Image (spheres, helix red, strand yellow):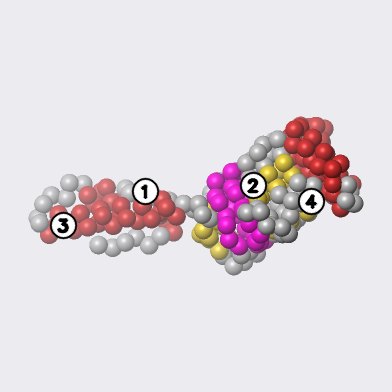
Amino acid sequence: MFRTLRQDVRAVFERDPAAKNLVEVLTCYPGLHAICMHRIAHALYRRRLFTLARLISHFSRFLTGIEIHPGARIGEGFFIDHGSGVVIGETAEIGRNVTLYQGVTLGGTGKEKGKRHPTIGDNVVISAGAKVLGSFEIGANSRIGAGSVVLKPVPPNCTVVGVPGKIVRRDGQRVDGIDLRHDQLPDPVAEALAAMQERIMHLEAKVRRLEGEPQAGGEADLANLQHPDRAQRDVLSP
């Protein structure tokens, strides 16, 4: 248990640049407090001391704003950044070196018995406000974008954004280390709108040329058109 605690403390220093010293981490990080109390509650839960385990879990929720059911299985190096509003269900399983941000829900659907919460692979990052609902697996090294709602399995090494969540990036290669840049996720809706805007501007410029009208800055406007990941997309030709 103490070895696991050391791993959890180490995860705070590795993934939060605001962490200054050990005393600060041990006294001022609600995510660490929540996982420590959960590990005690989980040990009691496995010994079928359900009420006592739930009391500890309830106290932890009151103290930290993080609700972790004592039945949830959580691996080493787990880190909850800020943590307010995080909910982890009874049959959730979380691998090693997983990072959750505030407002994340690992929940179930319906009233079925048995396994009804997600399984999270190693090195997964789930961004603020994301909801993962159902009994399926999020593959290792994947990232879930802020505010996404994931309802289906996600293969390893993927990036998921949107409601419902869609896979927008899959490189098929193992990610070295843990990628915490959850602010740099693609926006497929914005890219589609930008592509449509670009195509319309090309067509307008072509119509003006055919009708012999002045270009009225159309080509210049087209050259200055900005949209996400422009450098990674093929420019549409008229």
Q: Mark 3 points at which residue?
A: 207
Amino acid bearing label 4: Gly
- Residue 148 at x, y percent in the picture: 55, 50
Alpha-carbon neighbours of circle 3 within 10 Å: few (<14), some, or many (≥20)?
few
Q: In front of the other: label 1 or label 3?
A: 3
Location of residue 114 (image quadrant): bottom right
Q: Position of residue 1 (x, y in %)?
A: 89, 49
Question: Which mark is in front, 3 or 4?
Answer: 4
Q: Is residue 189 visible?
A: yes
> Sequence order check: which comes first, mark 2 or mark 3?
2
Locate residue 224 relative to residue 89 in the image: left or right. left
Q: List the residue tagged with mark 4.
A: 71
Disc ID at residue 137: none
Q: Along the line of sight, which residue is nearer the eye, 192 or 14?
A: 192
Rounded to the nearest angstrom, the CA distance separating label 3 from label 4 is 65 Å
- What residue span does the magenta drawing correspond to? 126-154
Mark 4: secondary structure: loop
Eyeballing the image, is 219 above or below 34?
below
Above or below: residue 178 compared with residue 86: below
Q: Could one spot residue 10 in this view of the protein?
A: no
**Which residue is at the far bottom?**
172
Q: Would you name the residue on which mark 2 appears? A: 105
Q: Residue at 61% of width from left, 62% of height from top?
A: 153
Amino acid tagged 2: Thr
- Cα separation, mark 2 vs mark 1, equals 35 Å
Q: In the rendered structure, which amino acid carries the disc numbered 1?
A: Gln
User: Which sits in the foreground, 42 or 4?
Assistant: 42
